[in-house]
């Protein structure tokens, strides 16, 4: 079942509650009554088409976008990615760390939890480094590309940037932060000894699966939409520059 503009926003959450953090990234707050998706997006100043494509793609891997995501401005995509980063750093990672602290109290043998804690600490540093690079280098660059493209301006410095280090160079170096998370899940599933609080162990593993799904959707948006879109603008800017 696809999300549509006339569906009640409350029904969207009932359809798939895992969309709650995604909806929050659009600065949409609970308490919208029986308003439709279209009405809520209008109330909160959200691009309706973008909201529908993002939410449908998140809950259905086989979803075919009704509107090409490449048609949306880079600034809109970057803003969503930035809010996703904030969610990881300020909500998800602290939540998982809190669970690990809880797990450390219910095992007589501290070694398995120490292994998980160290592995997660390495993963956290890797994810933070990945995010910092995107926030400080990649996102400012792609916004600069879009501004120059839209203004139809000649910018020799930007052209040199494209020649020196393009978005495709970034794509080749793009860290796959999902792989390490998969390894951590495997350690827990295969080697975690019986614990006193099975519910906490299961909740921790469940939240790792949710984070992995979120990260996969995040990577898809970057790899299949943002990078090709920026690469095309780079190509057109270089063509225009060589003709001048």
Image (cartoon, rainbow, N blue to C red):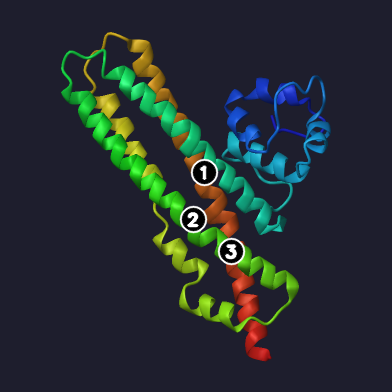
Pointer 2 with pointer 3, Cβ within 8 A? no
Q: Label 1, on which residue?
A: 85
Is the residue 134 above or below the residue 147 in the image? Answer: above
Residue holding disc 2: 134
**Element on which disc 2 rests:** helix
Dots 3, 1 in contact, CB < 8 A: no
Q: Position of residue 153 (x, y in %)?
A: 71, 79
Q: Nearer the viewer, residue 202 or 132?
A: 132
- Above or below residue 102? Residue 165 is below
Query: Quick one: quadrant of the C terminus?
Result: bottom right
Name the residue located 40 percent from the left edge and 61 percent from the top edge.
Answer: 173
Left or right of residue 72, residue 234 in this image: left
C-alpha span from label 2 to label 1 = 10 Å
Residue 238 x, y percent position in the rendering: 61, 81
* Mark 2 in CB contact with mark 1 (< 8 angstroms): yes
**Label 3, label 1: how far apart the Cα atoms are:** 17 Å
First reached walking from the N terminus: tag 3 or tag 1: 1
Secondary-structure class at tag 3 = helix
Residue at the far top: name it. Answer: 196
Residue 115 image offset from top left, x and y in percent: 21, 31
Disc on res. 142: 3
Which of these two is toward me, 230 or 103? Answer: 103
């Amino acid at each position: 079942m696809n999300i549509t503009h006339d569906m009640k926003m409350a029904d969207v959450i009932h359809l798939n509650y895992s969309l709650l953090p995604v909806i929050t990234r659009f600065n949409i707050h609970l308490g919208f009554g029986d308003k439709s998706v279209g009405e809520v997006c209008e109330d909160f100043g959200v691009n309706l088409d973008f909201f529908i494509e993002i939410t449908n793609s998140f809950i259905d891997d086989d979803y075919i976008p009704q509107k090409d995501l490449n048609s949306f401005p880079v600034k809109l995509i970057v803003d969503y990615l930035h809010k996703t980063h904030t969610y990881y750093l300020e909500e998800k990672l602290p939540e998982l760390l809190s669970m690990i602290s809880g797990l450390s109290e219910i095992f007589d043998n501290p070694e398995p939890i120490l292994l998980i804690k160290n592995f997660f600490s390495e993963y956290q540093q890797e994810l933070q480094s990945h995010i910092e690079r995107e926030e400080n280098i990649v996102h400012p660059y792609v916004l600069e590309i879009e501004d120059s493209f839209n203004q139809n301006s000649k910018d020799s410095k930007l052209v040199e940037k494209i020649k020196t280090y393009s978005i495709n160079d970034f794509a080749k170096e793009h860290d796959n932060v999902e792989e390490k998370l998969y390894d951590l899940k495997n350690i827990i599933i295969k080697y975690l000894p019986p614990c006193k609080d099975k519910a906490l162990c299961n909740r921790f593993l469940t939240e790792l699966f949710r984070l992995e799904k979120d990260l996969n959707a995040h990577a898809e948006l970057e790899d299949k939409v943002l990078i090709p879109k920026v690469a095309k603008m780079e190509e057109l800017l270089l063509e225009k520059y060589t003709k001048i």
